[in-house]
Amino acid sequence: MSLHFDSAAGTFTIHTANTTYQMKVDEYGYLLHLYYGARTEGCMDYLVTYADRSGMCASPHDVADRTYSLDVLPQEYAFQGAGDMRNPLLVVRDAEGTFGCDLRYVRHEIRDGKYGLPGFPAVYSESADDDAQSLSVVLADKRTGLEVELLYGVLPKLDIVTRAAIIRNTGSKKFVLKRAQTACLDMVHGDFDVITFDGRHAMERRPSRRAVTHGSFSVGSRRGMSSNQYNPVMILTDRDTTETAGRAWSMSFVYSGGFLAEVEKDQYEQVRMQMGLSDEQFSYPLEPGEQFVVPEVIMTYSGAGLEKISHNLHRCIRKHVCRGPWRDRPRPILLNSWEAAYFDFTGDSLCRLADKAAELGLDMLVMDDGWFGNRCDDLRALGDWTVNEEKLGGSLKQLVDYVNAEGLKFGIWVEPEMVSEDSDLYRAHPDWALAIPGKDPALGRDQLVLDMSRADVRENIFEQLCAVLDQANIEYLKWDYNRSIVDVYSRFATDQGKVLYDYIAGLYELLERLVERYPNLLIEGCSAGGGRFDVGMLYYTPQIWTSDNTDAHDRMTIQYGTSFGYPCSAVGAHVSACPNEINGREVPLSARGLVAMAGGGFGYELDLVELPERAWEIITHQIETYREIEHLVREGLYYRLSSPKKDPVCAWEFAAEDGSEAIVCAVVIEVEGYGVADYVVPRGLTPGAMYREVNSDKVYPADALMDMGVPLPISSAPYMSRMYRFERIG
Ligand code: GLA
């Protein structure tokens, strides 16, 4: 059993294969965090120190012991109001307008299986073989009737511990949540770095590592989306932790809206890491009897460097977050019309693209933006999800039937949460857009955001989407979202502080309805590229368009950073034209293909018809190769063999879990001087075994490969690329 309560000691212990998490209800009813680290037995309450530190530390009134202060003690669910002056997870304002609560242990329950969260995405377990368990610990504030049910889930084989909370008003008066975060991790000592994943539109999720010093460091999003700028994944490490050695703890937020991830070093050199909902424009009233779901955080610990953190998260997200038949199937290799034609296409030109795509062996044509209403540019028509038959020169069904007859699937782009001022929908329902009465709303890409907190708005969009999807055999939907929310006002909200949270709850409800109605539809998430690349979206969309930046050079950095928190199966990656539309860079087609093949959502996004014959040959070969290796990209272990920002060669590897095969990929980024050989050193092979290089007669001992590696051909120009495929032979 992974979860254990020791009633004599008051400790809850969660064991996974390699880790242990422990907390304790102390004699005063406070829930103290004791330990999260390498697997161990025993009670770790000796780690907590008590001393009469100063009058500045507050002791609870019923504790006649000046050595006891919540300002020092490691907390399991830090709350404002009883003396802990560090960053809180919970801040509550009562009916009289007063802040402050005092949460103490009431009861707990241990159950088999993994808990779910009503209306919100969460890690799931489908099989008893997972040995998943859940713990619920209820804390309560006597004065207000506020109850916090802390939820813990464990997937022991994957070293995954999840946390979430449900806040209930069991009292007789309303109170207001001013801050409701999910999890903190209090470390009583240590010298740490914190890694976050920062960027911007077209340059998302670059890892950035800094020392944890006194004070508070935070990243987050106040954009109503998880954002291109900061990603809701945070990793705490020892100062000397590397890719393959040292301790690391991570938190990933299973939520697609605004978030806050913080790390704070306190007066006693203790460190608190925490994650949860952003508290900006947040103010959530709970009437008696109401409850509030605090979305889930996935936690994992590694004693073997960052690679292990990623492996744990990849396994968890691939099989316990992503759902539906496409979770376990090869995804269609697609041709997307966006960078091939932008708005400038007709039904006929799409058919010519489909002809070529079929000839080269692709699986699907995706009609991106521009097919609906009078959408001839990005100034209009969002919200009018009616097929522009004039532009297509016929019905959607005719086009899709043609594409299907070519042996290709058909996919379509939508941006359902948005509305253009120049649209029939907006003209009919101006109050459906988020806008503050009396204030001109801020525009983003000339569009407004629909109020997804409203059921009538969601209903209209759902019906419009169904009307499109029911017209023809559409097997893939790219769900886009291209701006931040600025103006937060919903006509029927009882408190405008609810809107951003209710928006995301509404989005999840809409997506869930769609997933239920079209269980075989493959949905790809997108938000100006990777603006909503988060675990919450992956519950509905098993792949996400990673970035609008399709330049292979930049993509190596973006995909490298993305891989820390997300499996490659989720990564949408396409080969596009050169010079690249974003940065003008020229990279050979071979390297562009290799980089895009590191994504589970592989495809092309350029005018295939216009390419020279030699390019068609290369593409045909890339597609054949991808089909052979795709299972490793989707299910294999991913290894970051070097860093695209620090090393002259960017190298990565996918290896089967059992070590039976591996692919090692490398792109030379920097060529200096003359003649220096670069070596690529794989990992994850079976020690003692021999490996054969596929399509070659070369045989290598695994130990030598993992020690000295293989030399790359000496290159005189950047972007020379190679893929080595190794098969274990004995
Ligand atoms: C966003 C997406 C692109 C493309 C365009 C269409 O920018 O990220 O991939 O779909 O919208 O307008």
Image (cartoon, helix red, strand yellow):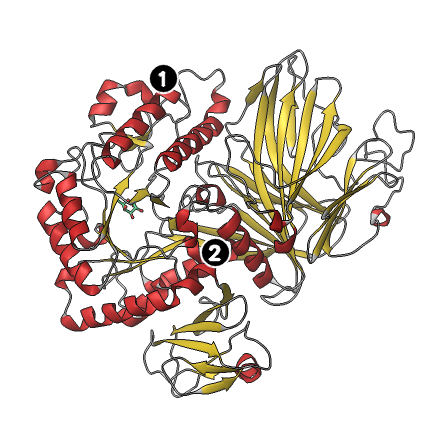
Tag 1 residue: 437
Task: Please report the residue visible at 55 percent of the width from the left and 22 percent of the height from the top.
Answer: 284
Residue 348 image offset from top left, x and y in percent: 9, 49
Tag 2 residue: 567
Report which quarter residue 594 is drawn in: bottom left
Q: Judge left or right: residue 170 versus residue 35.
A: left
* The one of 614 and 4 positioned closer to us in this rendering: 4
Give the SS element for disc 1.
loop
Q: Judge left or right: residue 350 versus residue 327.
A: left
Q: Judge left or right: residue 291 versus residue 505.
A: right
Task: Please report the residue visible at 32 percent of the width from the left and 51 percent of the height from the top.
Answer: 548
Q: Amino acid at mark 2?
A: Pro
* The one of 257 and 566 positioned closer to us in this rendering: 566
Task: Please report the residue visible at 59 percent of the width from the left and 15 percent of the height from the top.
Answer: 287
With respect to residue 417, does 364 lie above or below?
below
Instruction: Evaluate whether residue 359 shows in this view.
Output: yes
Q: Judge left or right: residue 267 versus residue 673.
A: right
User: Mark 2 to mark 1: distance in Å?
Assistant: 43 Å
Q: Amino acid at mark 1?
A: Pro
Task: Please report the residue visible at 74 percent of the width from the left and 17 percent of the height from the top.
Answer: 143
With respect to residue 617, does 108 lie above or below?
above
Instruction: Evaluate whether residue 216 shows in this view.
Output: no
Residue 468 image offset from top left, x and y in percent: 23, 34
Give the SS element for disc 2.
loop
Q: Residues within 10 Å of mark 2 (few under 14, many from 20)?
A: many
In primary-sequence order, the first of circles 2 and 1 is: 1
With respect to residue 640, does 156 lie above or below?
above
* The one of 250 and 535 positioned closer to us in this rendering: 535
The residue carrying mark 1 has its beta carbon less than 8 Å from ligand 1 = no
Q: Residues within 10 Å of mark 1 (few under 14, many from 20)?
A: few
Q: How many marks?
A: 2
